[in-house]
Amino acid sequence: MPRTHERTFRVRHYECDAYDTVYYTNYLRYIQETAMDASAAAGFGAEWYASRGFVWLVRETEIEFIEPLRYGDSVRVKTWVRNMRQALSKRAYELYCVADDRLVARAQTDWAFIESATGKPARITPEFRDAFFPEGAPPEEPRERFPAPPSPPPGAYVQRRRVEWRDIDPAQHVNNSVYLAYSEDCAVEAATACGWPPTRMRERGFAVEISRCRIEYRIPAVLGDELAVTTWLSERGDGNILRHFSIDRSDTTLSRAVAELRCIDPTTRTACSFPDEFRNALAQTFARVSA
């Protein structure tokens, strides 16, 4: 069995959005902080990495949002390393509402082991496997590649933004959670540009939320970068809507994401269908998917 670690957080008021639920980005912050604690508890704290010149950087995150957290809730995050490859470690997480032990989210992250001086991947040393797999490491798993998105349609929405000081973390680049914030901001703007701001959705008795999201981090954005955040939609065979994102600097893609959307009644939180008038208004932003 792998070594497990748990940490509990109390949800602060400033971590909640206009729907009175925790922002998606804060789930990523909870799991990142728990991962750092888990490493320190195993003997690999900040001083250990600084003295040896290594750092872990997120390469990909997949998260499923099952039920929302609200102000005043406490969330227990359980984490363990699922697998290690040459320079990648896959860490899994489960998030539970402490009050009733209800599973509210699950996630997994690919962490890359990096030489601080060069920024290049380094081979994970045996001491990590010994610490995180005391009964022996499992066989290596093949890495699932990020799914290729459909080409953006002419009506894809593009948001221009500059990386600000508040976006930068101690690694001197944009923190992994901020890319999700950029994407969510862009999605809200895209819907608003089609005549559907969140206020109008609420008036019509529905809200659009993310049920699952997968983010790929390719190249870090840094302070002052001018970014283009592009978003468009596609429809799966089961009728579910996917929202795609690409974050680019000039002609270089820094990050990609895909989010599975669901439509809910914001008062009862019961699932409902996307209204036809909403779908029709966003029709120009749907990609053409070949049969």
Image: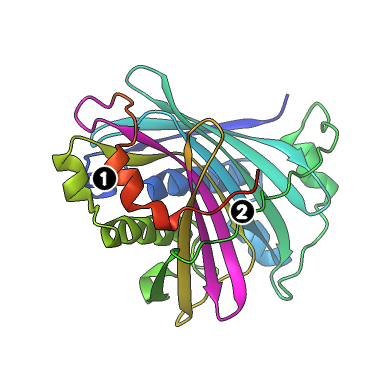
Closest to the observer, 208 or 44: 208
Q: Amino acid at mark 2?
A: Pro
The verdict on residue 23 being magenta is no
Q: Is residue 288 left or right of residue 132?
A: left
Q: Amino acid at mark 1?
A: Cys
In percent of the image, x 38 and y 32: which residue is there? 75
**What is the magenta range?**
242-269
Residue 156 lies, in percent from the top left, at 45, 63
Closest to the observer, 41 or 66: 66
Q: Main secondary structure of the magenta part?
A: strand
Q: Is residue 99 left or right of residue 59?
A: left
Element class at badge 1: loop
Say which residue label 1 marks. 16
Say which residue label 2 marks. 149
Q: Residues within 10 Å of mark 1 (few under 14, many from 20)?
A: some
Closest to the observer, 37 or 278: 278
Quadrant occupied by the C terminus: top right
In percent of the image, x 34 and y 47: which residue is there? 280
* Quarter residue 189 falls in: bottom left
Q: How has the structure been colored for display?
A: rainbow
Closest to the observer, 28 or 209: 209
Observer-side mark, 1 or 2, equals 2
Residue 146 lies, in percent from the top left, at 67, 50
In percent of the image, x 17 and y 39: which residue is there? 204
Q: Residue furthest left?
A: 203
Quadrant occupied by the N terminus: top right
In percent of the image, x 40 and y 52: which residue is there? 283
Residue 203 lies, in percent from the top left, at 13, 41
Q: Is residue 5 visible?
A: yes
Residue 258 lies, in percent from the top left, at 53, 49
